[in-house]
Amino acid sequence: MAAKKKQVISTDPGKMIYHNMDFIDSDNGRPIRIIAEFMAPNQIFQQEGVQNTIVFFGSARTLPMSEIKKRMKGCKDKKELARLKRLEVVAEYYDAAHELGAKLGRWANKQHKGFAIMTGGGPGIMEAGNRGANDVGTSSVGLNIRLPFEQHPNPYIDDKLNLQFRYFFIRKYWFMKLAKAMVVFPGGFGTLDEMFEILTLIQTKKYGDRMPVVIFGSKYWNKVLNWNYLAETGMIDKDDLKLFHFCDTVDEAYDVVTKALEKTME
């Protein structure tokens, strides 16, 4: 096994050590990077008046139906055509996230309580949610994370609310910190990870307030997971299935979220 290459920190006479990016990016600088990602978003949200968020989760790979049809037209690459046909099955969810983002955005604008639509900041479902918020002038937050593929900030995030993260666990913290509701659209490993961490925190009462969690697209999710079997085998309590709501239409998801939130504001 090759020895780990020793990191060399360059020095710049007269420059403060905390301005030395060689150090900040080094292994020894990791605690400082972590603290910065914990602390800086709070100041940004305060400056921009973001007090409450409705969070959208879902796949970065999802495309709107119009874009899929456009790309399919004249496509001669069999591999790409097969990929687009697979994505065509879930394209409706991009369009639903876009519509729901706008509808919840209009509701949020009337509340005057610093509501924002928050996503993971990338393409796909995340883009759709930010796009809906952007369409109606609602604060649009993106918590982007640097990855070797897929993830790049979408163009519908407010410039001052486009946050870049290095660490998944701190990004998850900020998803939860201001969240008053969550909507989980079809997705892969990342979406499953985010959804189950949230449900676990609510289930174990680690998250203070019981908030509405919508799982959008029962046709998709019931194929991916056998929810009832979890309860039948005692892996979860039957009542744990009440921690979330399956919704299949934008109007249904809108009603679940807004009715729950309006009760808390009474």
Image (cartoon, helix red, strand yellow):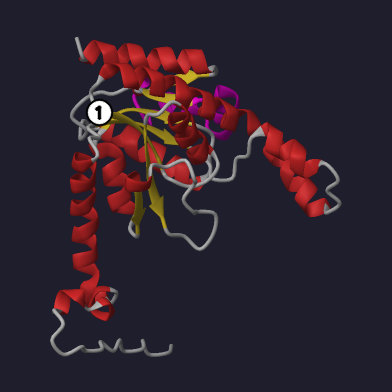
Quarter in which the C terminus is drawn: top left
Q: In the visual, does 186 lie left or right of 140? A: right
User: Which secondary structure dominates the residues rendered in magenta?
Assistant: helix
Which stretch appears magenta? 216-239
State whether residue 250 appears in this view: yes
Q: Which of 257 and 73 is in front in this view?
A: 73
Q: Does the magenta stretch include residue 218?
A: yes
Residue 216 versus residue 83 in the image, above or below? above
Against 105, is 117 above or below? below
Q: In which quarter of the image is residue 141?
A: top left
The mark tally for this picture is 1
User: Residue 101 sits in which quadrant?
Assistant: top left
In the image, is 206 to the left or to the right of 64? left
Residue named by callout 1: 114
Q: Position of residue 94 (x, y in %)?
A: 58, 32
The vertical placement of 106 against 174, above or below, is above
Q: Residue at x 36, y 17 (%)?
A: 107
Q: Which residue is drawn at 43% across and 16% down?
A: 254
Task: Please report the residue visible at 32 percent of the width from the left and 47 percent of the height from the top.
Answer: 160
Magenta-span inclusion, residue 266: no
